[in-house]
């Protein structure tokens, strides 16, 4: 016996029908990158990018490693120097062993303008500025250099005055090697001497340059016109379909008895497809072979001037991808850091609506946030990167690749195939997403590296 005058809510709920949501998933993101890329249907599973012949050396970085507290140059990475491309591995190892370690502090001059350059300097860690005295005596900033970058090969090999000065912005470590060590090796190896002499004479191709097309212009009369042809790459790059796969298992008891009001198999498949698409976006950014961050060409990498991403840094990116830039891609923390730098300068970026969401833009180019953009390092010292890309096949930019059609396709490039029911009454479904991404021309991508996101300002 109780003193209630009406039916208790807990008891009444037993007769009520609940309103249910589909299962929610925190890992789902807007995946702006996948939505921004133009997708090209590939009929045969292979996409070949034909280009004019170009002269490419590598990633314009010399990698280093630590051993017993000392820094060393990776010998094979010395092939970044054009005259060492075909050098014997033993010679590279000997030259790498000749590097000496030096430390530098903020404000220190690492290389003096006008002084004879008798050594090659590789920045192991830290950041420095290349500065030059302008035509009217003003101080001009040429470039910010960071980990793995080096200077100045031409002045070093010719033993000429350094055309700029290099001033340390942060503390760091550098490795240097003298010209006498290189000459000693060249005197023992005829092929190295020939390659070095050709480089000094300026006979080698300029890295990144395309094979020339001979033309005539501005002439009068009837001179003999040059004949020419366009050289293609002998071995053009081919992109094969990559994939993300998993096997979804659903017990027949679940799909038979608990299939209303929601189709259990469909709900399970939808959540799995979301996870496949998230992995797809991560691979498009970071896959070792075709990932966008791993396919930025030499000369298209930029270092921030102060560490934090500033409007000047993004303008520098735009100066690299100046032909129809499409989108920036950055981690949300990097976009927030850029917003703080804009606020500090009194130039708040314009907000534009793209893909149904308000996005920050700079110079009219949207900044797409993606939590797949990785950080390097740990804690407050972690750094990230900001990518700028041109998109579209007609614009010779970045494109996404997917098969024109696959059996049991449930979304473009994604199939769900019934693998049958086993003796435990479990039905298995093979879910496969086929995709790739291609950079059609090298100047379609640029990246701002070593971006710091932990810098805040006091506006009071």
Image (cartoon, rainbow, N blue to C red):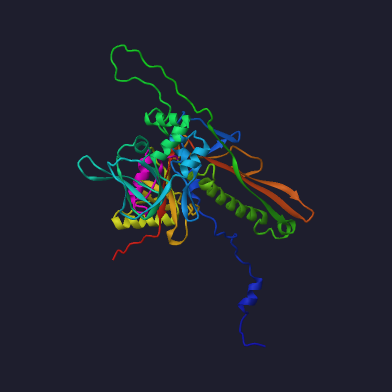
Residue at 46%, 32% in the rendered image: 192
Q: Which residues are magenta?
A: 297-322
Residue 360 higher or lower than 401, as above or below: below
Residue 185 higher or lower than 416, as above or below: above
- x then y, percent, for residue 57: 46, 36
- x then y, percent, for residue 395: 43, 35
Q: For the view shown, which residue lies furthest in the left direction?
A: 136
Q: What quarter of the picture does the N terminus occupy?
A: bottom right
Q: Nearer the viewer, residue 248 or 171?
A: 171
Residue at 61%, 81% in the rendered image: 6
As for residue 301 lying within the magenta part, the answer is: yes
Drawn side of residue 356 relative to residue 253, left or right = left
Drawn side of residue 36 relative to residue 312, left or right = right
As for residue 311 lying within the magenta part, the answer is: yes
For residue 395, say whether it is visible.
Answer: no
Q: Nearer the viewer, residue 201 or 145?
A: 201
- x then y, percent, for residue 125: 42, 52
Residue 339 higher or lower than 153, as above or below: below
Q: Nearer the viewer, residue 185 or 149?
A: 185
- x then y, percent, for residue 69: 47, 56
For residue 208, say whether it is visible.
Answer: yes
Q: What quarter of the picture does the C terminus occupy?
A: bottom left
């Amino acid at each position: 016996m109780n003193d209630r005058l009406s039916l208790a809510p807990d008891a009444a709920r037993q007769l009520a029908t609940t309103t249910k949501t589909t299962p929610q998933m925190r890992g789902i993101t807007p995946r702006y990158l996948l939505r921004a890329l133009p997708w090209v249907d590939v009929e045969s599973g292979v996409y070949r990018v034909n280009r004019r012949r170009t002269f490419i050396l590598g990633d314009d970085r010399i990698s280093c490693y630590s051993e017993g507290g000392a820094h060393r140059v990776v010998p094979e990475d010395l092939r970044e120097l054009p005259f060492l491309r075909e050098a014997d591995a033993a010679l590279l190892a000997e030259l790498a062993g000749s590097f000496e370690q030096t430390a530098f502090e903020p404000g220190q001059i690492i290389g003096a303008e006008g002084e004879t350059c008798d050594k090659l300097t590789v920045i192991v860690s830290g950041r420095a500025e290349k500065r030059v005295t302008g035509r009217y005596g003003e101080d001009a900033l040429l470039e910010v250099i960071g980990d793995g970058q080096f200077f100045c090969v031409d002045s070093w090999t010719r033993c000429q005055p350094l055309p700029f000065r290099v001033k340390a912005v942060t503390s760091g470590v550098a490795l240097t090697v003298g010209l006498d060590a290189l000459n000693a090796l060249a005197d023992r190896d005829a092929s190295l001497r020939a390659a070095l002499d050709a480089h000094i004479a300026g006979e080698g191709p300029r890295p990144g340059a395309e094979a020339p097309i001979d033309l005539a212009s501005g002439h009068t009369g009837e001179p003999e016109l040059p004949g020419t042809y366009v050289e293609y790459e002998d071995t053009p790059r081919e992109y094969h379909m990559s994939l993300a796969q998993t096997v979804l298992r659903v017990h027949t008891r679940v799909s038979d008895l608990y299939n209303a009001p929601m189709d259990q198999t469909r709900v399970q498949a939808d959540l799995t497809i979301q996870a496949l698409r998230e992995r797809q976006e991560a691979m498009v950014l970071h896959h070792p072979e075709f990932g966008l961050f791993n396919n930025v060409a030499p000369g298209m990498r930029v270092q921030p001037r102060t560490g934090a991403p500033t409007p000047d840094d993004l303008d520098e990116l735009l100066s690299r991808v100046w032909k129809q830039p499409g989108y920036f891609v950055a981690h949300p923390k990097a976009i927030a850091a850029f917003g703080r730098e804009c606020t500090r300068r009194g130039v708040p970026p314009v907000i534009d609506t793209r893909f149904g969401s308000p996005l920050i833009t700079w110079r009219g180019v949207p900044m797409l946030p993606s939590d797949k953009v990785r950080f390097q390092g740990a804690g407050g010292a972690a750094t990230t990167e900001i990518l700028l890309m041109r998109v579209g096949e007609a614009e010779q930019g970045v494109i996404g690749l997917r098969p024109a059609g696959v059996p049991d396709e449930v979304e473009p490039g994604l199939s769900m195939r019934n693998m049958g029911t086993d003796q435990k009454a479990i039905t298995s479904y093979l879910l496969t997403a086929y995709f790739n991404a291609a950079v059609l021309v090298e100047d379609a991508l640029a990246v701002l590296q070593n971006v710091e996101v932990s810098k805040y300002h006091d506006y009071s």
